[in-house]
Image (cartoon, rainbow, N blue to C red):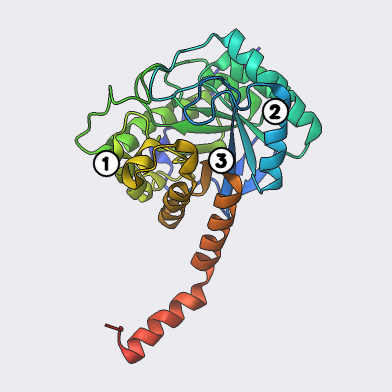
């Protein structure tokens, strides 16, 4: 049984980052002093760039092992596609049959691994948490299942609240991509998700926000959302960026094959890191792990930055 809801807490009352440089995920603290890489493991037949590659448990677990070896901090297991064209909702029963054996096997083989379940269904989330998951990544930001907050609060798990509009079948299309100010809309609509999460009793240190790149967003909206990460981070919660292989990268680069968009993904993620994102959801772990670690090392080198400014002050900027 899930306990009764505790008193509500308003996210707007939180003036300082509550996480203290960490993400609390069901009894574990993931430090945020370095970029966290979340490896995508789609155990679906129809995801937009890797559908069918890992829809058998043995192949999925082998892919999880590869991503962990390449430096993934979290493995995000998803059993329902939100692809831009033709996404179809699946039942909780079918989704559970896809994700639960994989989560159990990863947890058994890699007991130190942090596993996330990518679902909008509280029934699937509850079962996945029982199987060993520590994080619930809800692409609806608690919009589609009012029970999700209570399930997550009861489990004490980490939570990703992503901005989106519409349902599974159309949230990654342009059906709801109408904005006056896309960043202001993201911030405003995620406040509602935050308030729902806090009202359910979820620990503020467990919450991460995701601007939802590509979800109800055209290329210009996705670019604005990345550029607007500081406005989202100002809410006081860590920001996750999920730009991997997305359509806007193909539109900018001309690369039609999503699987060939790793370099563009790296570019988006390094920009996101510079703007304040701390967690990066990716298909290609090795490339992003290396790039983000190097970028973080540069950004952390305050002496180097001061040396550049001092040189310019003394000698003048080079023309």
Q: Which residue is mark 2?
A: 59
The numbered mark, 3 or 1, whose residue comes first in the sequence reads 3
Q: Closer to the camera: disc 2 or disc 1?
A: 2
- How far across and how far down the image is residue 108, in percent? 80, 29
Element under label 3?
A: helix
Residue shown at 27%/37% (left/top)?
A: 182
Q: Which quarter shows the N terminus?
A: top right
Element under label 2?
A: helix
Does residue 20 appear anywhere in the picture? no
Residue shown at 66%/48% (left/top)?
A: 71
The answer to whether 91 is drawn above or below residue 253 in the figure is: above
Tell me which corner region of the image, top left, top right, bottom left or bottom right, holds residue 216.
top left
Q: Which residue is mark 3?
A: 205
Q: Furthest residue to the left?
A: 180
User: Which mark, residue 64?
Assistant: none
Residue shown at 63%/29% (left/top)?
A: 156
The answer to the question of whether label 2 and label 1 lie on touching residues, with beta carbons closer than 8 A, is no
The answer to the question of whether label 3 and label 1 lie on touching residues, with beta carbons closer than 8 A, is no
Q: Which residue is mark 1?
A: 220
The answer to whether 266 is drawn above or below residue 308 in the figure is: above
Element under label 1?
A: helix
Tell me if mark 1 has few (under 14), some (14-19) or many (20+) residues whose alpha carbon lies within 10 angstroms of its own.
Answer: few
Tell me if mark 2 has few (under 14), some (14-19) or many (20+) residues whose alpha carbon lies within 10 angstroms of its own.
Answer: some
The numbered mark, 2 or 1, whose residue comes first in the sequence reads 2
The numbered mark, 2 or 3, whose residue comes first in the sequence reads 2
């Amino acid at each position: 049984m899930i306990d009764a809801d505790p008193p509500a807490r308003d996210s707007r009352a939180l003036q300082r980052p509550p996480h203290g440089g960490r993400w609390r995920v069901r009894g574990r603290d993931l430090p945020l002093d370095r970029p966290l890489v979340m490896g995508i493991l789609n155990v679906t037949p129809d995801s937009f760039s890797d559908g069918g590659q890992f829809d058998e448990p043995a192949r999925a677990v082998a892919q999880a092992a590869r991503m962990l070896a390449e430096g993934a901090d979290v493995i995000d297991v998803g059993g329902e596609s939100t692809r831009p064209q033709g996404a179809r909702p699946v039942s909780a029963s079918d989704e559970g049959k896809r994700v639960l054996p994989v989560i159990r096997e990863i947890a058994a083989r890699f007991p130190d691994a942090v596993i996330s379940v990518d679902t909008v269904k509280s029934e699937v989330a509850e079962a996945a948490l029982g199987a060993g998951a520590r994080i619930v990544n809800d692409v609806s930001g608690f919009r589609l299942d009012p029970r999700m907050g209570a399930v997550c609060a009861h489990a004490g798990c980490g939570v990703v609240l992503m901005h989106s509009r519409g349902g599974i079948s159309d949230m990654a299309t342009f059906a709801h991509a109408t904005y006056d100010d896309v960043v202001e809309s993201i911030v405003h609509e995620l406040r509602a998700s935050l308030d729902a999460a806090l009202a359910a009793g979820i620990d503020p240190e467990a919450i991460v926000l995701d601007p939802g790149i590509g979800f109800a967003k055209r290329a210009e909206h996705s670019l604005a959302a990345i550029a607007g990460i500081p406005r989202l981070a100002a809410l006081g919660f860590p920001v996750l960026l999920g730009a991997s292989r997305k359509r806007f990268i193909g539109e900018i680069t001309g690369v039609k094959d999503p699987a060939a968009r790793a370099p563009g993904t790296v570019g988006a993620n390094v920009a996101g890191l510079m703007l304040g994102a701390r967690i990066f959801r990716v298909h290609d772990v090795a490339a992003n792990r290396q790039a983000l670690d190097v970028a973080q090392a540069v950004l952390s080198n305050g002496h180097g930055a001061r040396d550049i400014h001092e040189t310019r002050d003394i000698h003048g900027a080079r023309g």
